[in-house]
Amino acid sequence: MKAIVLVGGEGTRLRPLTYTTPKPLLPIANVAFLERQLSWLARHGVDEVVLSLGYLPDAFVDHFPSGRFGDVKLTYAVEDEPLGTAGGIRFAAEQGGIDDRFVVCNGDVLTALDLTEMVRFHDERGAEATIHLCPVDDPSAFGVVPTLATGEVVAFVEKPSAGHAPTNWINAGTYVLEPAVLERIPPRLTVSIERDTFPRMLDRPGALFALQRDVYWIDIGTPEMYVEAQRDVLTGCIGLPPVDGATELAPGVWQQGGVSVAATARVEPPTLLGTGSDVGAGALVSGSVLGRDCVVEPGARVVRSIVLERARVASGAEALDAVVGSEAVLEADASVRDLTVVGAATVVPSGSRFSGARVPLQVAQP
Ligand code: GDD
Ligand code: MG
């Protein structure tokens, strides 16, 4: 079975991390998000994936130099201009020679959905398209999708204003589509599947179905969810070990390869220490992920935070509910808190304090 993964967006809500790394290649518990998604697709029988690309396409080609991920063959469909979600699907399907029922995923959704069951549901109903729905507390940031008891979709309302959602079951960003859907999408135009294609499909009864499944699901696209997804992976929410080959040092404390932890350091679960990470005397690492070759100097604190590879938290500095980009440095006594996101290779000066900030705010465009 073939799949298209939509990975062309700019990931604006995760800037400045996404200035240098596209959102799907950001790590979730030290494994690129897209690798987790491709593994999930492969477990459900997908053997060929077209990556629908636009933003920073070379990063994907560099990440998968062989054009494969395990047993999955990868094809790249690079848009000159963003074609939107439906335009991107049509273009990717043409590039990947898709002429049979296929799967589409948003490239930022981590889920334990049983895709095999979803494909069966789609086939049994003879649907033209089937959407996975999951329930959320606040549907206003999503596509909201009321259905009949049979699963047939009765409306598709993308991002309704607060308090106006007809249901709290939302589009979870996984679709099973028949090739007939492609004919509904005008070629080489910017078209949204959520705002254009799905709503128009309602004109033909019996075409658009949805499968309601309240399974583990998260969109990693905001700093809050990006941090939460990693904690979920460490605590086993998706039903798999956090990283292949990691060992559990103490309950909920995982280690990949060799790490150095001083005797007087405290490491509290759920935490993952990447290969070569170094935690100094009296330091605290709690509920966090350290990437490969990270350094937490003596007396530093990393709490409920994600520190990407080769970053350094200097003596007396702290990261509390923060994301620190790869090769970034928190100099001595610096403090980043409350969902502050520090970009790659950024130096946060000694003694400075940031709360809920993006550091740096802007990267000069070449
Ligand atoms: N190829 C391509 N071209 N991909 C795109 C484009 C484009 O022009 N625009 C966005 N994408 C990709 C993004 O990279 C992402 O993987 C996916 O499409 C969805 O875009 P987001 O920007 O993450 O959308 P969202 O999270 O606000 O809303 C979408 O996902 C929700 C579930 O997480 C919608 O599908 C909602 O209906 C849904 O509820
Ligand atoms: Mg999203």
Image (cartoon, grey):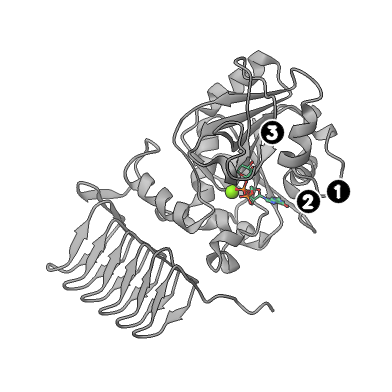
The answer to whether mark 2 is within 8 Å of ligand 1 is: yes
**In the visual, does 345 lie left or right of 353?**
right
Instruction: In the rendered view, tell whether residue 336 sits above or below residue 179.
Output: below
Q: Within 10 angstroms of label 2, few (less than 14), some, or many (20 or more) residues?
A: many
Residue visible at 16% across and 69% down in the picture: 262
Q: Amino acid at mark 2?
A: Leu
Give the residue pinned by disc 3: 156
- Of mark 2 and mark 1, the one earlier in the sequence is 2
Disc nearer the start of the sequence (2/3)? 2
Ligand 1 within 8 Å of the CB at mark 3: no
Q: Callout 3 environment at 10 Å: few (<14), some (14 to 19), or many (20+)?
A: many
Answer whether labels 2 and 1 touch (C-beta < 8 Å). Answer: yes
Whether 352 is drawn above or below 242: the answer is: below
Instruction: Give the spatial CA distance, label 2 vs label 3.
Output: 20 Å
Q: Amino acid at mark 1?
A: Arg
Q: Is there CB contact under 8 Å for labels 3 and 1?
A: no
Between circles 3 and 1, the one closer to the viewer is 3
Most extreme residue toward the left is: 263
Left or right of residue 42: residue 235: left
Q: Where is residue 200 shown, x and y percent of the image?
A: 80, 32
Quarter containing the N terminus:
top right
Please name the amino acid that badge 3 sits on.
Phe
Q: Specify whether residue 243 is in view.
A: no
* Disc 1 target residue: 188
Q: What residue did someone put label 2 on?
A: 83
Which quadrant of the view contains residue 48?
Answer: top right
Look at the numbered disc 1 and give the secondary structure of its residue: loop
